[in-house]
Amino acid sequence: MVDGWEWDETLFSGTAAYYQRGRLPYAPGLADVLAGALKLDGRGRLIDMGCGPGTLALSLAHLFGEIVGVDPDGGMIAEAGRGAAEAGVTGKARWVRARAEDLPAGLGTFTVAAFAQSFHWMDRDLVAADMRRLLQPGGALVHVSDVKTQTRTTDGLPYPAAPCTAMEELVRRYLGPVRRAGRGLLPHGTPGGEAAVFARAGFSGPERRVVPGGQALERTCDDVVAGVFSMSFSAPHLFGADRDGFEADLRRLLREVSPSGRFSERQPSTEVVVWRNSPG
């Protein structure tokens, strides 16, 4: 858990409707990399902790006999259910509205537990220990994230990049200089150091793999706006009565940079870190 900050239910309030459109996908080939690393064969059970709208779990559904997604936000769980229906995997998917720290009884055991850019919001030592108990001997815990150290240019692409620095400044103009998170503030951001947490819990590893990105992506103005509203630090509810004014200013900024309303971006690479629940 972040020092000096307490989780509350408004952390991602109102972001679910924007998530799938606004967030960039994981790098192509992620499912194949995981299938090879974990020897997945269409059986077994996956638990996706902090699943959001099911982005990761649904992309891996064909590799498991059952997927279970856990998220405390009701909007995210509803979106995940809709996504499962669209993908035709409702029969093998279960969505549980709960905090990672308060899992209901009766979930059973799993072959894989996944955290896709969600672990930093949790009581990490507690949750890691719980995952060790829920995973079968020889099972795997997988931490998935974008590669943060990668430089991604838009050189040679047809449209300008979204003005990220100016967009961040606009958010600060409306919400203040310190990063918002639910009803609280995160002056120092979210914690890192996941390796030490998983090691303390008794997992062995890590095994790191990178799924290469770099593919050219085209984004519309609506996509970029959705990306802003999908973030915890710029969730729609944080703007209160100023929400419409903020969106109008954001769209004005985007039109100034790209009158066509189109932007170019390169797909980030995806980092996969595997920890094993080794017997003994």
Image (cartoon, rainbow, N blue to C red):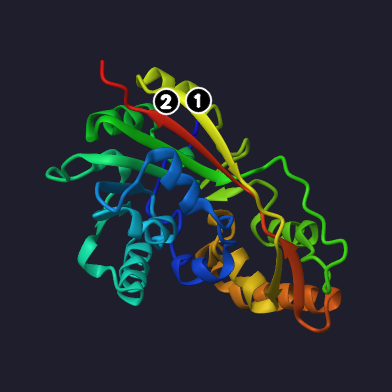
Q: Residue at x 77, y 52 (%)?
A: 152
Answer whether labels 2 and 1 touch (C-beta < 8 Å): yes
Reading the image, the residue beneath label 1 is 195
Task: Indicate the quadrant containing the N terminus: top left, top right, bottom left or bottom right.
Answer: top left
Q: Image quarter for residue 243?
A: bottom right
Q: Residue furthest right?
A: 156
Image coords of residue 226 (percent x, y): 59, 71
The one of 219 and 104 positioned closer to us in this rendering: 219
Going by the image, does 74 lie left or right of 182? left
Q: Secondary structure at mark 2?
A: helix
Q: Residue furthest bottom?
A: 260
Can residue 183 be seen from the camera position used here? no
Q: Residue at x 54, y 62 (%)?
A: 235
The kind of residue on which mark 1 rests is Ala
Can residue 198 be seen from the camera position used here? yes
Q: Residues within 10 Å of mark 1 (few under 14, many from 20)?
A: some
Q: Residues within 10 Å of mark 2 (few under 14, many from 20)?
A: many
* Distance from Cα at disc 2 to Cα at disc 1: 5 Å
The circle on residue 198 is: 2
Going by the image, does 133 lie left or right of 59? left
